[in-house]
Image (cartoon, grey):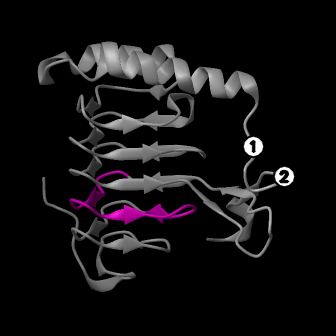
Amino acid sequence: MSGEHLRTFAQPDAYSSPWSRFTRLKVLLWVLVWWTLFRPTPKYLYRWRILLLRLFGAKISGRPFIASSAIVKMPWNLEMNDRACLAPGSEVYNLGRVVLGERCTVAQQVYLCGGTHDFSKRSLPLVVADIIVGEDAFIGARAIVLPGVEIHAGALVGAGSVVTRDVPSWSVVAGNPARVIKTREPPVE
């Protein structure tokens, strides 16, 4: 994580929330909407799910897809572009901003983690950073992407990988921690 992307929230102790009451109330309201109006919908009602995300402040352009079992912590910190996909069981823990570029795929049970803690301090303050997934990128099933990571255009992240640093364009990464194992060419039209 590069320092310019990190935001640390002051907390008096490890047990206090860094979020305002208003933010906590919005999260609670979103959880209620997710359970009652979002989660129980069939696959073909993705437009309804997109509408609900928009009502909670998500920036949506084009026609992305989000599975009914995908979890978004804070919709107002989500940006999805045309044909971006959040597959079943994926989780966007977007305490910071998460941007999903055009035609990117976040496969089943991927965890995009936008927050951690500063373990060098007794109060364990919350540290938040953005996650950006570039156009045509693919994140394989059950991968974990940590705060402050940018997965550049066309990159492939292998299933089960733990991504701790930026992934170059048109590269293939795998492992824990993920490392570049090869590069690839952009697909031919």
The magenta span reads 135-151
The image shows residue 173, relative to residue 41, as above or below, that is: below
Under mark 1, the amino acid is: Pro
| Residue located 57% across and 44% down the image | 97
Q: Position of residue 128 (x, y in %)?
A: 65, 54
Judged left or right of residue 76, residue 141 is: left
The image shows residue 6, relative to residue 67, as above or below, that is: below
Judged left or right of residue 46, residue 180 is: right
- How far is disc 2 from disc 1 in space, using C-alphas? 7 Å
**Which of the two labelled residues, at mark 2 and mark 1, occupies the earlier sequence position?**
2
Label 2 with label 1: CB-CB less than 8 Å: yes
Judged left or right of residue 73, residue 50 is: left
Q: Residues within 10 Å of mark 2 (few under 14, many from 20)?
A: some
Q: Position of residue 58 (x, y in %)?
A: 50, 26
Q: Please give the residue where the numbered disc 2 appears in the rendered image.
A: 10
Q: Please give the residue where the numbered disc 1 appears in the rendered image.
A: 18
Under mark 2, the amino acid is: Ala
Q: Give SS at disc 2.
A: loop
Q: Is residue 141 magenta?
A: yes
- Does residue 112 appear in the picture of this structure? yes
**Magenta span: helix, strand or loop, mainly?**
loop
